[in-house]
Image (spheres, rainbow, N blue to C red):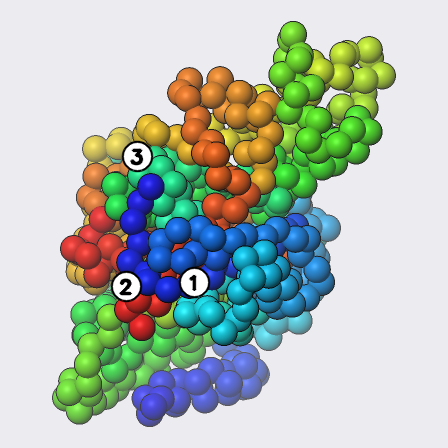
């Protein structure tokens, strides 16, 4: 049974391109963005429509993107280059400019390509490499201020304290609602909303009007809580509970998720930058640009950031917390071809989890369908292994 | 040998990319087997292999209590009572043959895997090669065709090499052209083949780092029939590698039959 609000979200996603057309006719500008650390609060406070761009799973787009960058660049970046080159995606078409941050240097280079080849107006936001030092915070605060000034010129508006405070409040509430939905998917023995549905809702938020999106999220949380009581009588699933980690799994990239689901693996959580991670922390406590900069520096680091002071690297602890909170039986570590930062981290994470007695399966893939059978065999063997261990004494 | 629960006759069938194998067991003992080339219809290959194995011992399908299919063709095995991955089946087969085995190197027609198992024959970790045919049976077939010798001749020739010529790639296409260049340069075929075997074994050893290696190391799959590869693996792992008297190409099918016995006795 599909949740009523989920159905409404799907209908709203269908309508959204037409709504943006109307808004543009009324003079609103649209800023597409690709990356991890773009503070949407600022875009929204300036009356600009933010849309997060990027699609996965389409090898045709990879092929198009490969005409502009090396075939040995990250497959998601190549697909995104293809998306921008083709200019058929409604959100790419409607974007008056595209913003990129330097969290992932391949994404930053994509910004350069976008400016050079596709003649799109571009904005860049510099990201420090060592989030916890005072210098890094000072640098990032200045970057956020500069980014804001450039967007003010772009929109013809000056950001007001009231608009910024309202926008910050809106995004704090969005983060809280998404965390709540994730918790329901991960904690309930028979969840009313599944991880895959929550993931779909997160991706819907890339495009929907953010105020409407928050209303949907809060209504969805309410519906999940109200529906939960009628479902608890059924037996809880005995499936293998899986946490997905690794490279971005962008909208449209369903290959691995479908393989795991068909094998009756139960994905219950993720620590993906296209999933829960941007919503975990990042509560903006001070309604200023500095407050935004500080909050974004406090978020979980994505794999692309080389954390130079390793004592401040919380990624492994974050993964462990996600595993414990979701009672995951194992981790499937998804690395996209030439997503080097994720590939490099694979063995370190596997060793870390080995000590925690949590099994990890590495899946190295791309958007072509030629490896479906190979991934299926690996995933099935992993599920067989974990299931047997679960039956005979818990975690490995 | 390990014990299995099954009372009665059970079949395991391993439908691989190049060959299909079947093993028939009766009350925990192997009583029949077959190996044939996989055709274009994996389902037919599976049923043919089982029939051939049964024919070899004057039995027929009605004698079978439970059948379990593995290998890439398992998804087309509607005739089987159950399926399991080749990783699980190799672990079961190896444990049946050598209960002390803790690491399995399996090199088949188109893939290569390292499997870790515990004292009960359960998989604790595994890794498979990437999707290309580098360092697999198919790779060796291509190399054999370059030297215009049979697959069975490769191992003895490699063991006759006094030196190992470094081979920079285990990519089937690149290695083929590299070997042709080395022959043109006047390198001895035996030395080149020793280098080829070392390149494959070093690649397997590199994979094994991700899952760890513990004795005893067991070598299965069709390529385990190649004595030169066994020697190269022992060099790379600095440990003896076990190949049982039982046909190593049948280990996956054997594990499928062992599992069939266990599951069939529960059914």
Q: Residues within 10 Å of mark 3 (few under 14, many from 20)?
A: many
Instruction: Tell me if I can see residue A381 in this picture.
Output: no
Chain at tag 2: A
Residues flagged by tags 1 and 2 on a common chain: no
Q: Which residue position holds label 1?
A: B10
Q: CA distance from mark 2 to mark 3?
A: 31 Å
Which percent across, then down, holds residue B10? 43, 62
Helix, strand or loop at mark 3: loop
Which percent across, then down, holds residue B224? 55, 34
Q: Which residue position holds label 2?
A: A241
Q: CA distance from mark 1 to mark 2?
A: 32 Å
The numbered disc on residue B100 is 3
Instruction: Tell me if I can see residue B181 in this picture.
Output: yes
- The residue depicted at 18 percent of the width and 70 percent of the height is A187
- The residue depicted at 71 percent of the width and 33 percent of the height is B151
Front position among marks 2 and 3 = 3
Quarter of the image where the N terminus of chain A is located = bottom left
Q: Residues within 10 Å of mark 1 (few under 14, many from 20)?
A: many
Which percent across, then down, holds residue A303? 38, 44
Task: State which quadrant residue B162 falls in.
Answer: top right
Helix, strand or loop at mark 1: strand
Q: Which residue is at the front of the view, A6 or A140?
A: A6
- The residue depicted at 35 percent of the width and 89 percent of the height is A2
As drawn, which residue projects farthest toward the front? B58
Chain at tag 3: B
As drawn, which residue projects farthest toward the top? B162
Chain at tag 1: B
The numbered disc on residue B98 is none
Which percent across, then down, holds residue B58? 56, 62
């Amino acid at each position: 049974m599909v949740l009523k609000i989920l159905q409404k979200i799907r209908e709203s996603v269908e309508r959204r391109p037409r709504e943006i057309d109307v808004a543009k006719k009324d003079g609103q500008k649209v800023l597409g963005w690709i990356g991890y650390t773009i503070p949407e609060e600022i875009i929204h406070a300036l009356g600009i429509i933010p849309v997060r761009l990027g699609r996965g799973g389409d090898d045709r787009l990879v092929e198009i993107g490969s005409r502009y960058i090396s075939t040995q660049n990250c497959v998601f970046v190549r697909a995104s280059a293809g998306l921008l080159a083709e200019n058929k995606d409604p959100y790419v078409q409607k974007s008056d400019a595209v913003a990129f941050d330097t969290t992932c240097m391949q994404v930053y280079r994509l910004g350069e390509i976008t400016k050079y080849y596709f003649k799109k107006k571009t904005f860049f936001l510099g990201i420090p490499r060592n989030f916890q030092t005072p210098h890094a915070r000072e640098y990032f605060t200045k970057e956020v201020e500069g980014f804001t000034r450039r967007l003010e010129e772009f929109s013809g508006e000056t950001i007001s304290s009231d608009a910024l405070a309202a926008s910050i409040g809106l995004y704090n509430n969005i983060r809280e609602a998404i965390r709540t939905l994730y918790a329901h998917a991960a904690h309930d023995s028979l969840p009313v909303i599944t991880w895959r549905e929550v993931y779909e809702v997160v991706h819907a938020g890339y495009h929907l009007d953010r105020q409407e999106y928050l209303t949907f999220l809060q209504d969805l949380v309410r519906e999940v809580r109200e529906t939960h009581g009628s479902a608890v009588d059924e037996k809880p699933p005995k499936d293998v509970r899986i946490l997905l980690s690794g490279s971005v799994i962008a909208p449209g990239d369903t290959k691995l998720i479908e393989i795991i689901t068909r094998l009756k693996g139960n994905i219950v959580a993720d620590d993906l930058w296209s999933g829960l991670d941007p919503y975990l922390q990042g509560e903006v406590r001070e309604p200023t640009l500095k407050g935004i900069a500080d909050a974004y520096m406090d978020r979980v680091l994505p794999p692309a950031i080389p954390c130079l002071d390793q004592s401040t690297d919380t990624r492994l602890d974050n993964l462990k917390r996600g595993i414990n909170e979701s009672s995951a039986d194992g981790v499937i570590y998804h690395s996209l071809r030439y997503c080097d930062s994720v590939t490099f981290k694979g063995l370190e994470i596997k060793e870390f989890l080995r000590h925690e007695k949590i099994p990890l399966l590495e899946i190295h893939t791309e958007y072509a369908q030629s490896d479906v059978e190979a991934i299926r065999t690996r995933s099935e063997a992993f599920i067989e292994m974990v299931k047997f261990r679960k039956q005979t004494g818990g975690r490995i | 040998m390990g014990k299995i629960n099954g009372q009665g006759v059970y079949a395991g069938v391993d439908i691989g990319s190049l060959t299909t194998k079947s093993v028939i067991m009766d009350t925990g003992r192997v009583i029949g087997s077959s190996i044939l080339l996989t055709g274009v219809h994996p389902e037919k290959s599976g049923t043919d292999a089982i029939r051939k194995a049964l024919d070899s011992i004057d039995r027929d399908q009605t004698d079978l209590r439970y059948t379990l299919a593995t290998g890439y063709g398992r998804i087309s095995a509607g005739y089987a009572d159950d399926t399991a991955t080749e990783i699980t089946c190799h672990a079961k087969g190896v444990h049946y043959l050598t209960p002390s085995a803790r690491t399995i190197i399996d090199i088949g027609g188109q893939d290569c895997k390292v499997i870790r198992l515990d004292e009960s024959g359960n998989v604790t970790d595994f890794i498979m090669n990437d999707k290309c045919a580098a360092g697999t049976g198919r790779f060796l077939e291509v190399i054999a065709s370059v030297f215009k010798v049979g697959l069975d001749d490769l191992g003895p020739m490699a063991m006759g090499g006094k030196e190992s010529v470094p081979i920079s790639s285990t990519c089937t296409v690149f290695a083929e052209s590299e070997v042709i260049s080395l022959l043109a340069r006047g390198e001895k075929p035996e030395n080149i083949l020793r280098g080829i075997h070392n390149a494959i074994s070093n690649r397997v050893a590199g994979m094994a780092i991700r899952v760890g290696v513990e004795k005893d190391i067991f070598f299965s799959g069709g390529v385990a029939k190649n004595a030169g590869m066994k020697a190269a693996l022992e060099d790379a792992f600095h440990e003896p590698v076990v190949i049982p008297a039982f046909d190593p190409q049948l280990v996956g099918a054997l594990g499928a039959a062992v599992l069939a016995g266990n599951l069939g006795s529960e059914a």
